[in-house]
Image (cartoon, helix red, strand yellow):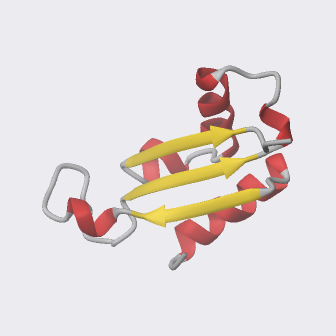
Amino acid sequence: MNGSIAQEMSQLLTEAFSPSKLDIINDSAQHSGHAGDDGSGESHFTIVIEASAFAEMNRLARQRAVIAALGDIVGERVHAVAIRASVPES
């Protein structure tokens, strides 16, 4: 995880969900020159998050919760975020 936006996302998601697993993968290099690439090197991310807080949520609700926790980052400061949110295995 490199860069201030990735660090900020990590902090926000940790505070919101206390995840047992959290990986924030910067995919920006794969989108260089494509729509949404602002040249910052922090325009596209994949978030892999596992948290008990998602237990009563369906896939769409989990994604909405993650986006809400990220505030203005998605859509304003980051072009695209892929989210894989799950519940820890027992």
Q: Position of residue 66 (x, y in %)?
A: 65, 40
13 vs 30: above or below: above
Q: Residue at (66%, 30%) from the top-left corner?
A: 62
Quadrant of the rendered structure where residue 63 is?
Answer: top right
Residue placed furthest toward the bottom: 2
- Left or right of 59, for residue 79: left
64 vs 39: above or below: above
Q: Residue at (68%, 39%) from the top-left corner?
A: 86
Q: Nearer the viewer, residue 3 or 22?
A: 22
62 vs 75: above or below: above
Q: Position of residue 1 (x, y in %)?
A: 55, 75
- Left or right of 77, for residue 54: right
Q: Quadrant of the C terminus?
A: top right
61 vs 32: above or below: above
Q: Position of residue 13 (x, y in %)?
A: 72, 53
Residue placed furthest toward the front: 90
Q: Nearer the viewer, residue 54 or 35?
A: 54
